[in-house]
Image (cartoon, rainbow, N blue to C red):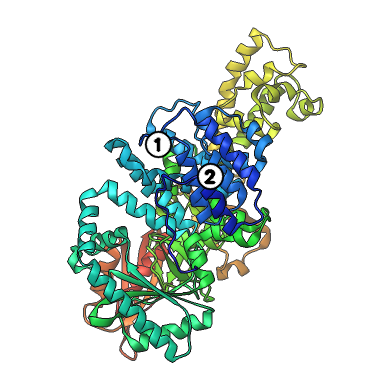
């Protein structure tokens, strides 16, 4: 039956014969002799081992396989469930599994196997590395994590047989990793069970108190549920709508969350009962919603439409809270039978429909690929785990693009997270954001319903500070990738220059040596893929010039030469410093601007446009006065000769306050000048001068000369001023 809850309880008496019968119900065409052979092999391998409960070990893989059958997983997954511990615990080679039961089964089993041959310094490091391994396996075959969830489900069901310390550790790990994973995969039946089990061991006093409180009124509650179901059925029949209606108390963990979030006791939690209505199609879902709202009083602000806007895990349903019979507050979920299948089994439900098409996009999810990408760009295991824990949180917010498209982000997401969710290039060039038409800082925490508009500039690039602002692994990964590329490009340039200078002392060049294929030895020795990688490693200091020279056959490199090179390295070191500081090529009292190819030249800012970092800029040679920098939109540009134009760019490493004029138009009210000035000062911005005048129709006009570090800080300041109730408009003057 579609509407029934999946029971994952521990079945000590489950046998292979019973398992086969259950498989027959959902997969009549399964290879039953092969499944039985798989069971017999697992039983033989585990024959000498017993569980902490004293039961034969085979009970565990049997229950894991039983859970996978209940989730309606395919044959390979079920066999992997039976075999998931044989590689780790019984030293069975993956090749043997592949020969006997197929490559797919072997791949899933290997993905579920912990890293046991490496000694880790701490338990946390071991946990992180094993999870990273699982992520890689999961990216290849999503069934790995579903088998792991089934494994964890049975382990949590039998956790009473291990020490209290192990109970606590397992429960916390489950709550941190496996519950969010189940949620991300949309397997709500598993998620709910695991949450209750975690609560039982992490907070036993709360769990058993809730169990007692709920059981005290069981008979009353059962009568109430039965009467409410009958009433809902009657109302639906009045409008000729057929469907299944079920009711139950909410999960203990769900009640616990409501208590902690609201800071109330059990008696003060009102919506303890949940009802579910399953109908044939989407039209009937909305029809039933109308019936429910006409029969019962809806609770304001408690309606959510996940059909029109599904969750990121593809969950679809209508949620509403109403005042039910006897003035009890109840929650009602309305969805189709197909939606319910996906809600209970999540990704696992898709195996029923996609048959044997393992190349289907259902085999991979976008967030898994993003985790993989992040995994490749981080070396610290604890950092990886922290980001994963945050990113797995499916409970999120819904925001809108200016065109009305919906994006789901996690709680705490910022405009930068949104920008990178749209496109990497949008994220990389973000200078500001408007939320519901108002400027906000980039660290602003988005809320459901916000309309987000991202402001970009071609000259803007990511900074390390952005890593502290972003919450999503996608944004963090993309920022790190950019920063690593910049660093790599810099090291490549330095390394190539240093090597070429060193080779010239021997009467040759990098290109000449390359033509003779004489870099092969050094590339092979250090396992570099190509010459570019060699340059990068020279520039970063991972390999020395002397090591490279010693590997080139045509160069006679002896001790005397080595000393000569060391002496001459002073010149190379000087050049290295010059290259790495090339971003500061300017002079005078302002080195905020880099002038292409020129040192020791005076650089001034055009007073007509007063550019600040972040503005697109042009440089113009001014006879006898050095370089003058103008914004690209400056009106003076048309008056200047194009032949005097020179390439300039902002120096991202330099921090300097720049004067800029801001025009503020307000309603002319007493004390408004003081209010604006105080607002600017509170934002940490210095005011150099202010000019105020009254305008017709009771308006005031102010010109403030303020000091800002860059365009981004200017936008934040404009936003701060604009937030004042009396302000009509804020513009850069």
Seen in the picture, residue 663 relative to 542 is either above or below; the reply is below
Q: Earlier in the sequence, mark 1 or mark 2?
A: 2
Camera-side residue of 467 and 191: 191
Report whether residue 184 is seen: yes
Seen in the picture, residue 83 relative to 203 is either above or below; the reply is above
Q: Residue 351: percent from the left, percent from the top? A: 60, 58
341 with respect to 204 (left or right): right
Q: Which mark is residue 43?
A: none
* Direction top: furthest residue: 559
Q: Mark 1 and mark 2: span between their CA atoms?
A: 16 Å
Seen in the picture, residue 573 relative to 165 is either above or below; the reply is above
Q: Residue 146: percent from the left, percent from the top? A: 52, 50
Q: For the residue carrying disc 2, how many other residues have a C-alpha within 10 Å: few (<14), some (14-19), or many (20+)?
A: some
Q: Residue 308: percent from the left, percent from the top? A: 50, 76
Q: Residue 282: percent from the left, percent from the top? A: 52, 79
The residue where tag 2 is placed is: 16
* Direction front: furthest residue: 17
Camera-side residue of 250 and 695: 250
Q: Quadrant of the C terminus?
A: bottom left
The residue where tag 1 is placed is: 55
Which residue shows up at 65% across the image and 32% down it? 95
Which residue shows up at 50% across the image and 40% down it? 132
Q: Tell me the SS state at disc 1.
A: loop
Which residue shows up at 48% across the image and 83% down it? 242
């Amino acid at each position: 039956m579609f509407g029934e809850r999946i029971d994952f309880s521990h079945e000590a008496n489950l046998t292979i014969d019973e398992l086969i019968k259950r498989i027959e119900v959902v997969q009549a065409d399964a290879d039953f002799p092969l499944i039985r052979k798989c069971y017999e092999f697992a039983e033989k391998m585990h024959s000498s081992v017993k569980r902490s409960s004293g039961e034969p070990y085979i009970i565990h893989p049997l229950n894991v396989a039983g859970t996978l059958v209940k989730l309606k997983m395919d044959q390979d997954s079920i066999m992997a469930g039976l075999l998931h511990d044989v590689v780790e615990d019984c030293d069975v080679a993956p090749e043997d599994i592949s020969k006997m039961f197929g490559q797919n089964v072997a791949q899933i089993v290997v993905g579920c196997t912990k890293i046991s041959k490496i000694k880790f310094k701490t338990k946390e490091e071991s946990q992180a590395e094993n999870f990273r391994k699982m992520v890689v396996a999961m990216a290849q075959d999503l069934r790995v994590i579903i088998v792991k969830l089934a494994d964890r489900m049975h382990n949590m069901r039998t956790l009473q047989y291990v020490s209290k310390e192990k109970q606590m550790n397992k429960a916390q790990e489950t709550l941190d990793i496996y519950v969010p994973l189940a949620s991300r995969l949309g397997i709500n039946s598993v998620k709910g069970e695991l949450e209750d089990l975690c609560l039982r061991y992490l907070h036993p006093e709360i769990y058993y108190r809730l169990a007692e409180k709920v059981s005290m009124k069981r008979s009353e509650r059962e009568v109430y549920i039965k009467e409410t179901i009958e009433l809902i059925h009657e109302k639906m029949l009045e409008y000729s709508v057929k469907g299944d209606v079920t009711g139950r108390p909410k999960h203990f963990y769900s009640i616990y969350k409501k208590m902690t979030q609201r800071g109330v006791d059990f008696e003060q939690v009102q919506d303890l009962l949940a009802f579910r209505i399953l109908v044939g199609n989407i039209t009937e879902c909305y029809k039933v919603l109308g019936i429910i709202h006409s029969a019962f009083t809806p609770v304001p602000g408690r309606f959510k439409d996940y059909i029109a806007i599904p969750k990121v895990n593809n969950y679809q349903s209508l949620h509403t809270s109403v005042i039910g019979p006897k003035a009890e507050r109840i929650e009602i979920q309305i969805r189709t039978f197909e939606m319910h299948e996906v809600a209970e089994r999540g990704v696992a439900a898709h195996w029923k429909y996609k048959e044997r098409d393992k190349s289907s996009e259902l085999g991979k999810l976008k967030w898994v690929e993003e985790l993989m990408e992040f995994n490749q760009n981080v070396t610290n295991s604890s950092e990886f785990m922290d980001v994963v824990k945050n990113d797995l949180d499916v409970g999120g917010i819904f925001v809108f693009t200016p065109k009305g498209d919906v994006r789901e982000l996690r709680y705490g997401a910022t405009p930068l997270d949104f920008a990178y969710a749209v496109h990497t290039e949008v994220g990389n060039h973000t200078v500001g954001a408007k939320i519901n038409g108002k400027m906000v800082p980039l660290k602003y925490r988005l809320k459901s319903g916000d309309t987000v508009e991202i402001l970009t500039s071609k000259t803007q690039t990511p900074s390390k500070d952005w890593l502290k602002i972003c919450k999503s692994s996608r944004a963090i990964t993309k920022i790190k990738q950019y920063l690593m590329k910049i660093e790599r490009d810099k090291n490549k340039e330095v390394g190539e220059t240093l090597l070429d200078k060193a080779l010239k002392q021997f009467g040759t060049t990098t290109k000449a040596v390359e033509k003779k294929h004489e870099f092969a030895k050094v590339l092979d020795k250090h396992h570099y893929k190509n010459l570019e990688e060699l340059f990068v490693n020279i520039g970063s200091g991972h390999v020395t010039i002397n090591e490279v020279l010693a590997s080139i056959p045509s160069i006679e490199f002896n001790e005397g030469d080595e000393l000569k090179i060391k002496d001459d390295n002073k010149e190379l070191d000087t050049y290295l410093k010059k290259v790495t500081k090339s971003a500061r090529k300017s002079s005078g009292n302002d080195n905020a601007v880099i002038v292409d190819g020129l040192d020791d030249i005076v650089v001034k800012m055009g007073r007509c446009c007063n550019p600040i970092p972040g503005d697109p800029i042009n440089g113009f040679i001014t006879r006898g006065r050095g370089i003058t920098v103008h914004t690209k939109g400056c009106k003076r540009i048309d008056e200047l000769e194009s032949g005097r134009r020179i390439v300039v760019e902002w120096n991202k490493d330099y921090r300097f306050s720049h004067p800029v004029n801001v025009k503020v138009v307000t309603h002319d009210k007493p004390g408004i000048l003081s209010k604006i000035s105080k607002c600017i000062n509170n934002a940490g911005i210095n005011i150099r001068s202010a000019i105020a005048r009254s305008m017709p129709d009771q308006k005031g006009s102010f010109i403030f000369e303020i000091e800002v570090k860059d365009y981004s800080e200017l936008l934040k300041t404009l936003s701060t001023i604009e937030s004042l109730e009396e302000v009509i408009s804020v513009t850069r003057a």
